Image (tube, rainbow, N blue to C red):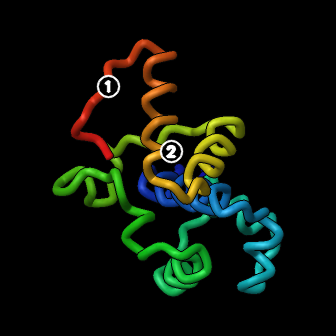
Amino acid sequence: MPRVRNPIDAHVGARLRLRRTLAGMSQTELGSKIGLTFQQIQKYEKGANRIGAGRLFQFAEILGVPPSFFFDGLPAGPAANGDGAEVMEAPVLSRDSMELLRAYNSIPNENVRRRILALVRSMSGEAESDERG
């Protein structure tokens, strides 16, 4: 019987992929920093293999985020008990979306970033929110 992918493992893997991509790092580069192959990184990112606590801590250090980053967006309470009944997977971003986000985050001037965001929102028809920052 094939192993069923745990939605929490899939969420953590998707967050790993997101952060690695935003950091501009390949699967091979990340793997070599901790002695893994790119295939092992792929399995983690797809949620096929569960990431242990020690390994997750290593990923967090290398990628410059707190370990909690990988759990952001998960519901608290009964849905987080591991049965995956109500856990939603992180949305998969396209390569273009991740490249756009990486470029946006690399802009050092906060005012420029806000103006770009306002421009994109106006182009998409989304109403601006003065509360976002």
Please name the residue that numbered disc 2 is placed on: 112
Looking at the rendered structure, the kind of residue marked 1 is Glu
Which residue is rendered at x = 43% and y = 29% of the image? 118
Task: Please rate how many residues cluster around mark 1, counting C-alpha atoms within 10 Å: few if below 14, some from 14 to 19, many from 20.
Answer: few
Q: Position of residue 76 (x, y in %)?
A: 20, 56
Residue on which the image places disc 1: 128
Q: Is residue 21 above or below residue 61?
A: above
Looking at the picture, does residue 116 appear above or below residue 20?
above
On the image, the x and y values in percent for residue 78 come to 18, 54
- Name the kind of residue labelled 2 in the image: Val
SS under mark 1: loop
Q: Seen in the image, is 13 located left or right of residue 86?
A: right
Q: Is 116 situated above or below 76?
A: above
Nearest to the eye among marks 1 and 2: give it. 2
Which one is nearer the viewer's eye here, 39 or 20? 20
Residue at point 51% right, 26% down?
A: 120
The label number, if any, that marks residue 12 in the structure image: none
Position in image of residue 23 (x %, y %): 65, 63
Q: Which tag, 1 or 2, sits closer to the chain's start?
A: 2
Label 2: state its secondary structure. Answer: helix
Image quadrant of residue 77?
Answer: bottom left
Q: Name the side, left or right, on which 43 lies relative to 79.
A: right
Q: Residue at x 50, y 38 (%)?
A: 91
Cα gap from disc 1 to disc 2, whole angstroms: 15 Å
On the question of residue 131 being in view, the answer is yes
Q: Tell me: 89 left or right of 99.
A: left
Which residue is depicted at the point 38% across and 62% down?
A: 71
User: Does residue 85 appear in this view?
Assistant: no
Which of these two is toward me, 87 or 24? 24
Q: Position of residue 68 (x, y in %)?
A: 37, 70
